[in-house]
C-alpha cells in the first residue's frame, strides 16, 4: 500500500517532500476501509450520517474515506512527518502494543492518519488535508509471548519485586484528609434555621483520604474518628469506596450506637488516588449538656510500603527471592482490639515509621499525625415538639384550661361571683423546646379581670405577679409572656374575673391559646422573653398567629356546671358593685376620667393665669396715664 520506492532525496532533480506516498490500495485493506475522522477530534471516527440507524448497517457506520493511491501520509498515529514505510511500520507496532497494554483482549486498533491529497480541480494548487481513521486488526502473532513461569527455587529466575514509594503523612505532606458533615434529615432543606442540628437530626459524615505523590502508596489506611458527646453512630450506615472505585457496605461486623471512637479501613491509597467512607449519626439529647459544639475531626493511619518488605536474613543471604506476604485489612469497620492492638499503639506505629523513613527529624521532636479540618453539622439545638396529634401519637404541647367559681359550689353562677381561671401549657417531649411561649386569652364580655389576681408560674416553678398592662381592656385580650418551655416542663397562668350583668343570657365560654417558636425556625443566639411580662406582637396578632401556630383548650370553659353556650348566669347583682372597683376595665375607665379632669383643671389654671396677667397689664397702663 505504501510506495516502496519513494523519490530519492539525494537526487537534485527530485526535491524532498514531506510524508510517505501511498501506492496501490486494495478496497478491503485497512487503507481501503478508512473512515472520516471527527472534525472536532481527529483521533476519533466521525459520527454516522444517520445517528439513529443500526450500528451494524452501513448507514449506522462513520462515512467512508478510503486512502487512495497518490495520497501522501504526513502523520501516522503519533508520528509526525514520517520519511519512509519503515517509520510507519514502527509506529504501527507501537500503536498495537499500546492498545494491548490498555486492553489485553482488544482485537483491533484505530489509528488517526493525516494525508495530503492533490487538488482534483487544480493539480498545481496546494494539496487538500484529509484526516481519516484507519482500523488495523490485531492478529495473534502481533501479541507478545507470555512470560515463562517463574521458578521460585531459582534465585536468578524471577522478576524484580516492585514496591511503591513511601509517603510523607506529616502536615503539608502527601496525605490529605477531609471531613464534611451534611444534615440529611427529611425536610431540613425547608427549615428557616439551617444553622442548628436539632436533637433527632441525622447527619451524614464523609471522610476522604487522598495521596498526592505519584508512584507511591499508603497501605491499609485506617480512619480514626472520635465522636463528640451528643453524636451517635447509626449501625449499618457505613459505605466505603476504595481507591479503585469499589463500593463496600452491609458489613458483618459494625459499630454500635454507643461507640465513641469509630474506625474504618478504606484499603490501600496509591498515588494520585483517594478513598472515602460515609456514615450517618444521630444528634442525641446529650448534645444539649455542653456548649452545643458538634464539630469533630478524623485521623488517617496507614502502613508504609517499605515496612512490608522483609529484612534479609544475615545468616542466610542466599535464602531465595524476596517474597512480600501481605494480609490486607478488608475495607469496612475497624476495631484495633480485633487485631491485637490499641488506638494508641496504632498511632505510635505510624510515628515510628515516620522516624524510620525520615532520619533527619531531630531527636526528641514531637511528630503529630495531622487531623482533618473539623466537620461542623451546626450548633446543637433542642428538637421541635409536636403541636398536633398524628399517626405517631398525641401532640407534645398541650393547653388545659379550667374554671372555678370561688363564691358558690352548687353549679350555678350569679352576677357578682368571682371565677378563677387556670391555664396550663405543658411540653411532654424530652429534649425539645418551645421558645418564647405566650398565653393569649380573649376574655368574653360579662367577665372582667380583677386587678392583682394574675400570677404566672414559669417552667422553673417560679411565680411572677403579672401586671395590669398584660390585659388590653379595649380588645379584651390578655397576653402574657411565659419564657421558654422545655420538654418535661409546664407554665401556669391564674387570674380571677368578676361576673357582670353582661353575662346574663350570653355565651361566656372561653378558649385560651398558646403560641411559641420552634427550634427549627429560630436562629441560634436569640434573646428569650421575660416570664410574666406583657406581650404585644409588633406585626399584629393576625400575622403573629399565622407565623406561630399554637395550641388551645379543645372545648370552651364555662364558670360552672350550670352555665353553657346558651347562657345560665343568674342575674342577681349581689355584691358586684363592691367588686367593680377592682376590675381592670373599671381601673382603665377611672384612669380616663382622672386624665380628663386633670386636663380641665390645667386649662382652667391657664385661663386664670392669662386673666391675672391681663389685669396687671391694664393697671400698669392706668398708672402711666
Image (tube, rainbow, N blue to C red):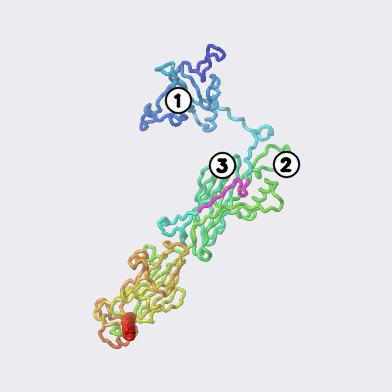
Figure check: 438 above or below 116: below
> Residue 344: where, in percent of width, then height?
64, 55
Task: Residue 177: say if magenta.
Answer: yes
Residue most toward the front? 625
- Disc 3 target residue: 272
**Front position among marks 1 and 2:** 1
Q: Is residue 75 visible?
A: yes
Q: Secondary structure at mark 2?
A: loop
* Mark nearer the N terminus (1 vs 2): 1
Figure check: 588 above or below 308: below
Check residue 132 in the rendering and tell me which mark sits there, or answer none.
Answer: 1
Q: How many other residues sit within 10 Å of disc 2, few (<14), some (14-19) or many (≥20)?
A: few
Q: Secondary structure at mark 3?
A: loop
The residues tagged by marks 1 and 2 sit, at their Cα atoms, a distance apart of 60 Å
Q: Is residue 377 left or right of residue 167?
A: left
Q: Is residue 405 visible?
A: no
* Mark nearer the N terminus (2 vs 3): 3
Figure check: 575 above or below 272: below
Residue placed at 49% from the left, 64% from the top? 285
The one nearer the camera, 594 or 355, is 594
> Residue 74: where, in percent of width, then height?
50, 22
- Residue stretch in magenta: 168-180
- Disc 2 target residue: 313
> Residue 374: where, in percent of width, then height?
54, 55
Amino acid at each position: 500500500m505504501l510506495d516502496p520506492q519513494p523519490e530519492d532525496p539525494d537526487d537534485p532533480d527530485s526535491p524532498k517532500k514531506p510524508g510517505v506516498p501511498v501506492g496501490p490500495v486494495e478496497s478491503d485493506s485497512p487503507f481501503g476501509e478508512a473512515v472520516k475522522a471527527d472534525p472536532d477530534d481527529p483521533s476519533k471516527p466521525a459520527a454516522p450520517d444517520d445517528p439513529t440507524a443500526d450500528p451494524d448497517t452501513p448507514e449506522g457506520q462513520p462515512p467512508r474515506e478510503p486512502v487512495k493511491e497518490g495520497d501522501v501520509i504526513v502523520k501516522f498515529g503519533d508520528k509526525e512527518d514520517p520519511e519512509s514505510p519503515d517509520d510507519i511500520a514502527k509506529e504501527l507496532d507501537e500503536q498495537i502494543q499500546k492498545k494491548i497494554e490498555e486492553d489485553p483482549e482488544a482485537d483491533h486498533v484505530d489509528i488517526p492518519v493525516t494525508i495530503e491529497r492533490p487538488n482534483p480541480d487544480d493539480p498545481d494548487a496546494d494539496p487538500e488535508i484529509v484526516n481519516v481513521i484507519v482500523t488495523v486488526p490485531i492478529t495473534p502473532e502481533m501479541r507478545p509471548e507470555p512470560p515463562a513461569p517463574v521458578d521460585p527455587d531459582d534465585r536468578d529466575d524471577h522478576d524484580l519485586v516492585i514496591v511503591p514509594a513511601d509517603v510523607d503523612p506529616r502536615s503539608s505532606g502527601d496525605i490529605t484528609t477531609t471531613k464534611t458533615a451534611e444534615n440529611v434529615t427529611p425536610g431540613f432543606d425547608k427549615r428557616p434555621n439551617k444553622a442548628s442540628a436539632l436533637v433527632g437530626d441525622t447527619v451524614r459524615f464523609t471522610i476522604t483520604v487522598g495521596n498526592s505523590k505519584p508512584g507511591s502508596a499508603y497501605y491499609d489506611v485506617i480512619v480514626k474518628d472520635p465522636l463528640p458527646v451528643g453524636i451517635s453512630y447509626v449501625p449499618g450506615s457505613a459505605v466505603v469506596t476504595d481507591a479503585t472505585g469499589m463500593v463496600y457496605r452491609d458489613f458483618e461486623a459494625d459499630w454500635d450506637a454507643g461507640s465513641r471512637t469509630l474506625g474504618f479501613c478504606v484499603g490501600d491509597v496509591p498515588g494520585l488516588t483517594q478513598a472515602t467512607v460515609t456514615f450517618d449519626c444521630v444528634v442525641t439529647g446529650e448534645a444539649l449538656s455542653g456548649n452545643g459544639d458538634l464539630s469533630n475531626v478524623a485521623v488517617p493511619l496507614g502502613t508504609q510500603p517499605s515496612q512490608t518488605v522483609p529484612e534479609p536474613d544475615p545468616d542466610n543471604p542466599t535464602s531465595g527471592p524476596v517474597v512480600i506476604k501481605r494480609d490486607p485489612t478488608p475495607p469496612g469497620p475497624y476495631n484495633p482490639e480485633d487485631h491485637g492492638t490499641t488506638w494508641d499503639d496504632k498511632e505510635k506505629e505510624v510515628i515510628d515509621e515516620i522516624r524510620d523513613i525520615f532520619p533527619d527529624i531531630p531527636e526528641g521532636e514531637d511528630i503529630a499525625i495531622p487531623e482533618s479540618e473539623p466537620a461542623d453539622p451546626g450548633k446543637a439545638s433542642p428538637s421541635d415538639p409536636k403541636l398536633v396529634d398524628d399517626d405517631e401519637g398525641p401532640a407534645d404541647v398541650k393547653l388545659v384550661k379550667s374554671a372555678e367559681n370561688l363564691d358558690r359550689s352548687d353549679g350555678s353562677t350569679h352576677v357578682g361571683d368571682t371565677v378563677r381561671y387556670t391555664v396550663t401549657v405543658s411540653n411532654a417531649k424530652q429534649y425539645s423546646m418551645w421558645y418564647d411561649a405566650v398565653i393569649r386569652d380573649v376574655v368574653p364580655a360579662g367577665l372582667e379581670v380583677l386587678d392583682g389576681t394574675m400570677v404566672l408560674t414559669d417552667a422553673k416553678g417560679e411565680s411572677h405577679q403579672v401586671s395590669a398592662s398584660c390585659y388590653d381592656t379595649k380588645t379584651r385580650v390578655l397576653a402574657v409572656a411565659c419564657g421558654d418551655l422545655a420538654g418535661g416542663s409546664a407554665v401556669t397562668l391564674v387570674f380571677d374575673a368578676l361576673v357582670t350583668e353582661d353575662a346574663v343570657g350570653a355565651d361566656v365560654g372561653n378558649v385560651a391559646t398558646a403560641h411559641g417558636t420552634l427550634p427549627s425556625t429560630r436562629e441560634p443566639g436569640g434573646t428569650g422573653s421575660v416570664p410574666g411580662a406583657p406581650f404585644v406582637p409588633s406585626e399584629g396578632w393576625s400575622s403573629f398567629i399565622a407565623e406561630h401556630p399554637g395550641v388551645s383548650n379543645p372545648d370552651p370553659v364555662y364558670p360552672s356546671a350550670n352555665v353553657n353556650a346558651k347562657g345560665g348566669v343568674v342575674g342577681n347583682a349581689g355584691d358586684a358593685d363592691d367588686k367593680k372597683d377592682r376590675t381592670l376595665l373599671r381601673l382603665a375607665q377611672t384612669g380616663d376620667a382622672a386624665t380628663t379632669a386633670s386636663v380641665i383643671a390645667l386649662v382652667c389654671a391657664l385661663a386664670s393665669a392669662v386673666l391675672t396677667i391681663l389685669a396687671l397689664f391694664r393697671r400698669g397702663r392706668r398708672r402711666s396715664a
